[in-house]
Amino acid sequence: MSIQEITSADFEEVVLKSTKPVLVDFNATWCGPCRMLKPTLEQVAAERPDVTVVGIDVDDNSDLAGEYGVFSIPCLVLFKDGMEADRSVGLVPKEAVLDLLG
Amino acid sequence: MAYDIIIVGAGPAGLTAAIYARRASKTVLVLEAKAWGGQIINTPDIENYPVAAHISGFDFADKLYNQAVGLGAEVRLEKVTGVADLGEKKQITTTRDTYECGAVILATGSENRKLGVDGEDKLVGRGVSYCATCDGNFFRKKDVAVVGGGNTALEDALYLADLANKVYLIHRRDSFRGEDSTVQRLSARENVEFVYNSTVNRLIADKRLTAVEVRNKLDGSLREIPVSGLFVAVGRVPENESFRTLVQVDEAGYVVAGEDCHTAVPGIFTAGDNRTKMVRQLVTAAADGAVAATEAVKYLNG
């Protein structure tokens, strides 16, 4: 399952106003560990239809990275009801992503 | 399950060993604790590997992985917790399973040395970083500190000086181990301050890092430096913890082996950054992989 890439323009609609939990993957094209993490996130997205998984390019959306205190990527931030519920930083195995979702 | 050769670590050394072992028709299992590719995946652009003038670390790792798997190597993401030498057979225990093989290649590489200050782990990604070129961009126009005195610390400080508002370079001695030319270039920067004879005593944070407290080793005084980023460049440590009782390691933890990649134990070889050696580069890791696999094949064939 491919992951929808979003921008600052649709962040409010897709993430903050979502009724489902949203897992946001802050990434960049030059970031090797981010690219390593992608297939894992695709698997998680396929297995967990109760969660929306989206990607945000930090270079194109540095405002969002700044607002949410992203200082290292890959950074996964879980949003519930428009609020940050949890996060993990760095390349993590699938089990850790599933743990984050609870 | 039994294999001819089990390789611990799927970085450039381990995967190159897998290629050579498969081409010699040996059955191969590569066990990797984190993600295949090793630390090279953090490098955005590799410029010193022969033939490939520019390649990203990710693409390098991806091609290498596909080459090894394409030749029939099996790669599993399992952390090795122990290697036992049973003479002709070796037994490998992972967090999931136990495997047997005739020869082992330890290619576990190295990881960033931590400062060992309270709260460090929790602040990774919240201000604490071990990779200036990866994370530097998030600290544009902010105040940051670099800890360390070697070339990596100096180069990190220089890189960050172009991005950040101010860079403090914290070092426990009164002079740097790294190259003089880099020290001179740093001295010329108005936004770089050297903090000599000092160690990081405490990390000050709310949700994110806000300051570091350093202790001056000469007079014991404490100084609080407000920074939003702390880049730790105090060297690397080999990931040989699980093999300390199996093979000989030096005082820094590297597996003692010469250019032939033989450890003191027959049938156990080592390759890459976790081996005692002079030059730790991508190309020398790959070279070690070739040597270790060739020696392992020779050992198995008697």
Image (cartoon, coloured by chain):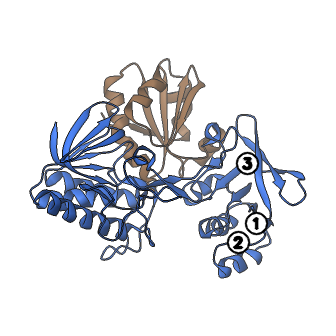
* Neighbours of disc 3 within 10 Å: few (<14), some (14-19), many (20+): many
In the picture, the disc for residue B228 is: 3
Please tell me how crowded label 2 is: few (under 14), some (14-19), or many (20+) other residues with Cα within 10 Å: some
Which residue is tagged 2? B176
Chain identity of mark 2: B
Q: Residue at x 69, y 59 (%)?
A: B146
Chain A colour as displayed? brown
Q: Secondary structure at mark 1?
A: loop
Q: CA distance from mark 1 to mark 3?
A: 24 Å
Q: Chain of mark 3?
A: B
Residue B173, numbered circle: 1
- Relative to residue B282, is residue B97 drawn left or right? left
Residue displayed at 76% across by 66% down: B173
* Dot 2 or dot 3, earlier in sequence: 2
Tell me where residue B133 appears, x and y as whole percent. 56, 60
Please tell me how crowded label 1 is: few (under 14), some (14-19), or many (20+) other residues with Cα within 10 Å.
Answer: some
**Residue B127, labelled with which disc?**
none
Residue at the image point whose x is 50% and y is 17% from the top = A19
